[in-house]
Image: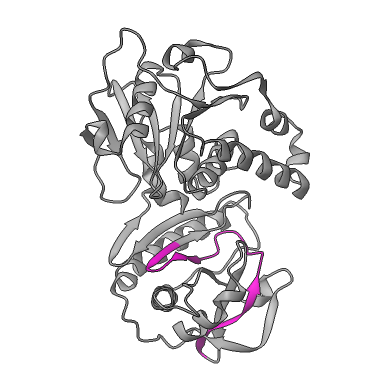
């Protein structure tokens, strides 16, 4: 236990009880399944205090730069090779903004724990246990609450996103909805293994990171039906199809646990995601053979223009709505929705330059295109 600090960030006060319940439930379930070496569960006042310090630090500048930091709640004795300070730092905006320039690289976390009844920053770590409470600060006023997945692979699972006074709590039950694409199910699955869908997650994150916007079309392997929705000739068609990513994923499971394999996978994913920055769509089969990039989407002959779609977001209290595709974005979103309407076995992943990310898939129950807005899960 530690002395609760006075907090002034109202969103932290509102979200803390819900986040406390989430981590308590996740850790309880993990322990019941026999998991070991887990992170400690954060109490409500701890969550509130860490969010408060991170938020106010995010609004400050150090030599003109905004901080980009990650805070992890755990003691140094739960960490492999901690970089531990001789004297702990107080958990305050002042301390965080001063140390931020040295810990901005991805994968570095500032460790937070109790010292002399006060929350303090004890040092840094690159490794944290499963379900460890993490607060990431990617930009001013934006906080992402997340934790490491059970298998330790890939992107951390997001729990909530706070932007100023806006709170978006991830709705885990979205994964059980009918017609939920495997990609979205994996993003919401807090113990998702190294699956094909998990690679989609890495592709989505990398597409969003390059900041230029882009479209990735996933089409069924072994068919050429998709060609009726693409303008020919394709300037950057690939023949034969490039299968570097596919070959990696077909390797034995024991290989996939090695750091060298995971680094090769990261490189392949980033190479493909970078192609989506070229004007037009990147095409890949659902077994990961790269077919083309810079392709222009065209409405299939005899098909009606897509007039409406079902919009959903995996956020608590959000409701599905039937909207016109232009309400989502511009030409990129409209063409992706049209492609999925005409090629119902396909999935379209669309990144916007403003950071929003949408997955388009056909909903047989609703008999229309369903647009899943998932940027809350990718931060």
Q: How many marks?
A: 0
Q: Dominant secondary structure of the magenta stretch?
A: strand
Residue visible at 58% across and 66% down in the picture: 39
Q: Is residue 179 visible?
A: no
| 118 vs 218: above or below | below
Depth check: give the residue in front, 139 or 376. Answer: 139
Which of the 4 quarters of the picture holds residue 13? bottom left
Residue visible at 38% across and 31% down in the picture: 360
Residue visible at 33% across and 32% down in the picture: 331
Residue 19 at x, y = what percent? 40, 64
Depth check: give the residue in front, 69 or 135. Answer: 69
Based on the picture, tell me whether residue 132 belongs to the magenta stretch: yes
Depth check: give the residue in front, 246 or 100. Answer: 100
In the image, taking residue 23 as reference, residue 249 lies left or right, namely right
| 268 vs 148: above or below | above
Q: Which residues are magenta?
A: 117-144
In the image, taking residue 311 as reference, residue 255 lies left or right, namely right
| 183 vs 144: above or below | above
Residue visible at 76% across and 33% down in the picture: 252
Applied colour scheme: one colour
Q: Is residue 268 visible?
A: yes
Residue 29 at x, y = what percent? 51, 54
Which of the 4 quarters of the picture holds residue 139? bottom left
Based on the picture, tell me whether residue 183 belongs to the magenta stretch: no
């Amino acid at each position: 236990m530690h002395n609760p600090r006075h907090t002034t960030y109202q969103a932290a006060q509102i979200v803390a009880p819900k986040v406390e319940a989430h981590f308590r439930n996740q850790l309880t379930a993990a322990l019941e399944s026999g998991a070991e070496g887990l992170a400690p569960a954060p109490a409500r006042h701890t969550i509130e205090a860490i969010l408060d310090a991170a938020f106010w630090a995010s609004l400050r500048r150090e030599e003109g730069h905004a901080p980009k930091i990650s805070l992890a709640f755990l003691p140094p004795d739960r960490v492999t090779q901690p970089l531990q300070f001789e004297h702990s730092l107080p958990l305050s905006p002042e301390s965080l903004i001063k140390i931020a320039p040295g810990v901005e690289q991805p994968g570095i976390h500032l460790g937070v724990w109790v010292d002399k009844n006060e929350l303090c920053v004890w040092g840094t770590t690159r490794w944290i246990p499963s379900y460890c409470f993490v607060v990431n600060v990617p930009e001013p006023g934006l906080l992402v609450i997340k934790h490491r997945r059970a298998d330790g692979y890939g992107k951390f699972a997001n729990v909530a996103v706070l932007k100023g006074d806006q709170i978006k709590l991830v709705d885990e039950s979205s994964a059980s909805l009918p017609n939920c694409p495997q990609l979205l199910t994996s993003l919401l699955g807090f113990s998702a293994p190294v699956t094909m869908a998990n690679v989609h997650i890495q592709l989505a994150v990398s597409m969003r990171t390059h900041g230029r916007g882009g479209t990735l079309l996933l089409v069924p392997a072994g068919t050429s039906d998709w060609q009726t929705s693409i303008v020919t000739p394709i300037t950057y068609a690939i023949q034969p199809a490039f299968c570097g990513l596919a070959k990696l994923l077909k390797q034995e499971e024991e290989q996939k646990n090695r750091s060298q394999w995971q680094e090769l996978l990261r490189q392949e994913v980033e190479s493909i995601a970078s192609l989506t920055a070229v004007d037009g769509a990147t095409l890949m089969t659902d077994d990961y053979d790269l077919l083309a990039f810079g392709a222009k989407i065209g409405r299939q002959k005899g098909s009606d223009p897509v007039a409406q779609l079902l919009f959903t977001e995996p956020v608590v209290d959000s409701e599905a709505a039937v909207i016109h595709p232009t309400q989502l974005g511009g030409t990129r979103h409209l063409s992706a929705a049209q492609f999925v309407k005409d090629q119902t076995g396909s999935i379209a992943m669309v990144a916007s330059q403003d950071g929003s990310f949408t997955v388009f898939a056909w909903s047989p129950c609703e008999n229309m295109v369903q647009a899943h807005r998932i940027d809350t899960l990718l931060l």
